[in-house]
Image (cartoon, rainbow, N blue to C red):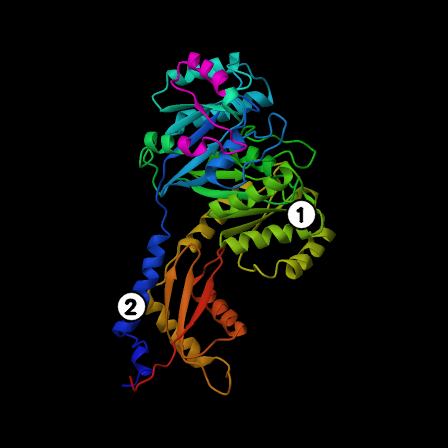
Amino acid sequence: MTDETSTTYSGDGIWNEEADWELAEFEGEADEASHIPVPVLAVVGRPNVGKSTLVNRIIGRREAVVEDVPGVTRDRVSYEANWAGRKFMVQDTGGWEPDAKGLQQSVARQAEHAMRTADAIILVVDATVGATSTDEAVAKVLRRSKTPVILVANKVDDERVEADAAALWSLGLGEPRTVSAVHGRGTGDLLDIVLDVLPTTPREGISVGGPRRVALVGKPNVGKSSLINKLSGDERSVVHDVAGTTVDPVDSLVELGGKTWRFVDTAGLRKRVSHASGAEFYASLRTKGAIEAAEVAILLIDASEPITEQDQRVLTMVAEAGRALVLAFNKWDLVDEDRRHILEREIERDLVRVPWALRVNISARTGRAVQKLVPALETSLESWDKRISTGRLNTWLKEVVAATPPPLRGGRLPRVMFATQATTRPPTFVLFTTGFLEAGYRRFLERRLREEFGFDGSPVRISVRVREKRDRRK
């Protein structure tokens, strides 16, 4: 038996030890990618004390929106952090106001929720101002909480302010930890304290089988917040005719079809990130993060207007993240017969890269067909999670390759020896071959794979691993 034939799949589920080693390598990579629940650190305080700046310092990157005006952060936003080899989530919140009204009342509820669900809490106070009545009200609530609380005196840029920070002992939350979030002063010591109080696992034992995460994405003013409100049955998100009302991703638990779903309403993406500034720029970055944190995305497109560059750019972000996808054409109540014919041509031209995405025509304003989103989401996620057994996959592959061999490359015919599904989410297949397979042939295999096994609503990735011919004299 030659080296080349020793790696050929036998058709009965058996191949040689070298191939087994390759598969074990893939399985190990998939295991490493599995999700492990981590504890949550909530950062709370009144508006404009520097919470988002401190969050950026903790996570080591500039993601939380920061501007020199109060109230930029309106909703709970979570980020991954790592310190001294330990991972945890940091939850940024809007300013906490005990007597808030209107929009600020909604902000207060978001912050209070973070306090109830976090494994540890940082209360940020402006040391240059001292303890205000709002700080005292927050401290009163936190003193009754069983969750560990760390009092942080921010904006301590030099030793002169440290004496002022000592007055914060009066809040009854122990020693105030002095930091300067802007300059990084004292943040390393603070993180050491955070690790001391954070449990190694979340206190609520969050499991992988929790609510499925749905990112609601699209250009500004396409109706994302209106759809969230229609699905949830209440005013979860701020809605206004002015584009760009949503800045932070907004998490909403929504009961649909007998299941609980976690929807994330994201900021609309402008034409180009480089054209945005300040809060808009970082909101765009966070929208990308929300897509990557989700399992399935609903791309909301205004059916009454031509498909735009923004729509396609969001589509690219979802596709690159490898997430399941549902295309929801909103404002269908404004679409007449002529527009429908034009839209079909636009879809064929502009959305050709995702022919597998499920499509639903809805109206967030009237509620038309929004209930059809649930089966579309379920089908897409089922495809996203689908795994094909190696025996079944190779039986199918043998028939397809025999009927339509790959094109010659360099005068030689590449042999497809066997295939395996390396991972799910999205389904990823690896083909072991004796030569490189052209992109056109890989697209052909993907089409046939979908015809045989489905995968509606999910991307499918196919990679080729060319087996180098070893020197038999060794």
Instruction: Report the number of numbered marks.
Output: 2
Residue 200 makes an appearance in the image: yes
Q: Secondary structure at mark 1?
A: helix
Q: Amino acid at mark 2?
A: Trp
**Extent of the magenta region:** 162-190
Q: Which residue is mark 2?
A: 21
Q: Which residue is mark 1?
A: 274
Which residue is situated farthest in the front direction here?
Answer: 159
Q: Nearer the viewer, mark 2 or mark 1?
A: 1
Residue 179 vertical placement versus 260 (above, below):
above
Residue 196 vertical placement versus 29 (above, below):
above
**Dot 2 or dot 1, earlier in sequence:** 2
Q: Residue at x 29, y 68 (%)?
A: 21
Residue 95 vertical placement versus 433 (above, below):
above
Q: In the image, is 454 to the left or to the right of 15?
A: right
- Residue 185 is a magenta residue: yes
